[in-house]
Amino acid sequence: MGSYKKAKKYIRKNKKTCYVLGKRKKKLIDLAQEELGIIFSPQHRDFLRSYGAISFGATEICGLVNENFNKPSASDVVWNTLEERKNGLPSKLCLVYRFGNGDLFCLDYNSLNTDGEPRVVSYRHDSEKEDQEYEVIAEDFGDFLWGQMECEGNGPF
């Protein structure tokens, strides 16, 4: 079973500890893609459509809150990504998680795996843009999400 399917199964079985925002409509997902200038991968699109956003333990995975992308929201993937782009985040990165040390974990739409899914990479604000080396955190969103669930909010992998 793939990691994303394992994560979905975990969410179904742990409704008391996995807090999901709720399903999101295609129209909102389309608006988010337009605003960010990227097309969400199949796994990420399914996550957004099925859950909106999710938190479990101390972990909060950014998702879609509503179409007001200018209103600050720690849970919103669009607002977070747009805010970080003001600080130099490249346009092909989509923020999905803020690590406690200030690193950002992002879907890298410049680096797709063999299934066409973007890898999850770390982005460091303390590195110059031209010196930035993206550490691959997970091969795709499903691996990242499942890895976070396995350690139940105690940090990545």
Image (cartoon, rainbow, N blue to C red):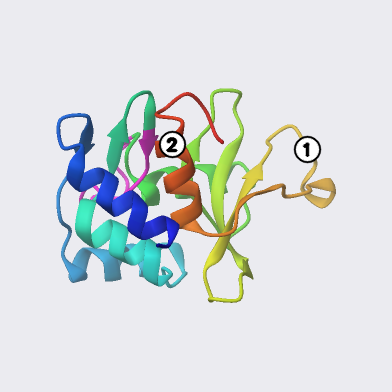
- Residue 80 vs 141, above or below: the answer is above
Q: Nearer the viewer, residue 99 or 32?
A: 99
- Looking at the rendering, the stretch of residues picked out in magenta corresponds to 60-73
Give the x, y percent position of residue 102: 59, 27
**Is 99 inside the magenta-drawn segment?**
no
Magenta-colored segment: predominant secondary structure = loop
**Is 62 inside the magenta-drawn segment?**
yes
- Please indicate, yes or no, whether residue 58 appears anywhere in the rendered image: yes
Q: Residue at x 53, y 43 (%)?
A: 84
- Residue density around tag 2, few if under 14, some if 14–19, many if 20 or more, within 10 Å: some
148 on left or right of 137: left
- Which type of secondary structure does the marked residue at label 2 adopt? helix
Q: Which residue is mark 2?
A: 150
156 on left or right of 39: right
Q: Which residue is mark 1?
A: 127
Q: Residue at x 33, y 62 (%)?
A: 32
Q: CA distance from mark 2 to mark 1?
A: 30 Å
- Please indicate, yes or no, whether residue 67 appears anywhere in the rendered image: no
Give the x, y percent position of residue 80: 43, 43
Instruction: Choose top left, top right, bottom left or bottom right for residue 1.
Output: bottom left
Looking at the image, is mark 2 or mark 1 earlier in the sequence?
1
Q: Amino acid at mark 2?
A: Glu
Give the x, y percent position of residue 79: 38, 46
Q: Residue at x 72, y 47 (%)?
A: 135
Q: Residue at x 45, y 38 (%)?
A: 148
Q: Amino acid at mark 1?
A: Ser
- Which type of secondary structure does the marked residue at label 1 adopt? loop
Q: Which mark is residue 139?
A: none
